[in-house]
Image: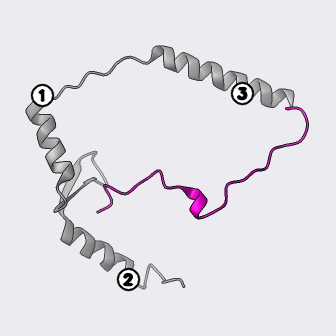
């Protein structure tokens, strides 16, 4: 249900993109901070090592099939670092049940 939602939503639909640019020269402290951040990014990029997949072809194929299956929802568990696989219909029913609980949520207009 939410697994395929676009997390890179264009926020300009909600709020126009700002065109504001600060006046005058950049403060020396800001410039120093920028240089430190750029240095740290450069160090991290140099340390970046290629990650090799530890799954064989069949395992990757099976995971892709599960990901593309619209009848199930795969989510991280609230506790314990596990995963939960739910029937999509049951998942949506539970979401709506919780959202319609007026003790915790109030509809807005």
Residue at 16 percent across and 42 percent down: it is 63
Q: How is the image coloured?
A: one colour
Element under label 1?
loop
Q: Position of residue 44 (x, y in %)?
A: 51, 20
Which residue is disc 1 drawn over? 56
Q: Position of residue 43 (x, y in %)?
A: 55, 16
Q: Which contiguous range is marked in magenta?
A: 1-26
Quadrant of the rendering where the C terminus is positioned: bottom right
Relative to 33, say whether 106 is above or below.
Answer: below
Mark 1 or mark 2, which is nearer to you?
1
Task: Find out whether residue 105 is within the magenta segment.
Answer: no
Mark 2 or mark 3, which is nearer to you?
3
Which residue is disc 3 drawn over? 34
Q: Is residue 28 left or right of residue 52?
A: right
Relative to 89, say whether 100 is above or below.
Answer: below
Q: Position of residue 49 (x, y in %)?
A: 38, 17
Element under label 2?
loop
Q: Is residue 4 left or right of residue 8?
A: left
Q: Residue furthest top?
A: 46
Q: Is residue 83 left or right of residue 109?
A: left
Identify the mark nearer the N-term, 3 or 1.
3
Q: Are the residues tagged 1 and 2 within 8 Å (C-beta)?
A: no
Q: Residue furthest left?
A: 58
C-alpha span from label 1 to label 2? 45 Å
Q: Residues within 10 Å of mark 2 (few under 14, many from 20)?
A: few
Which residue is disc 2 drawn over? 101
Identify the mark nearer the N-term, 2 or 3.
3
C-alpha span from label 3 to label 1? 42 Å
Q: Main secondary structure of the magenta part?
A: loop
Quadrant of the rendering where the N terminus is positioned: bottom left
Residue at 60 percent across and 58 percent down: it is 12
């Amino acid at each position: 249900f939410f697994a395929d939602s676009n997390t890179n939503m264009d926020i300009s639909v909600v709020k126009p993109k700002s065109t504001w640019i600060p006046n005058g020269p950049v403060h020396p402290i800001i410039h120093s901070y920028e240089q430190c951040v750029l240095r740290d990014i450069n160090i991290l990029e140099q340390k970046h090592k290629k990650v090799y997949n530890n799954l064989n072809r069949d395992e990757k194929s099976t995971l892709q099939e599960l990901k593309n299956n619209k009848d199930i929802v795969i989510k991280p568990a609230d506790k314990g670092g596990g995963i939960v696989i739910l029937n999509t219909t049951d998942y949506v029913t539970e979401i709506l049940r919780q959202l319609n609980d007026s003790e915790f949520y109030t509809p807005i207009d």
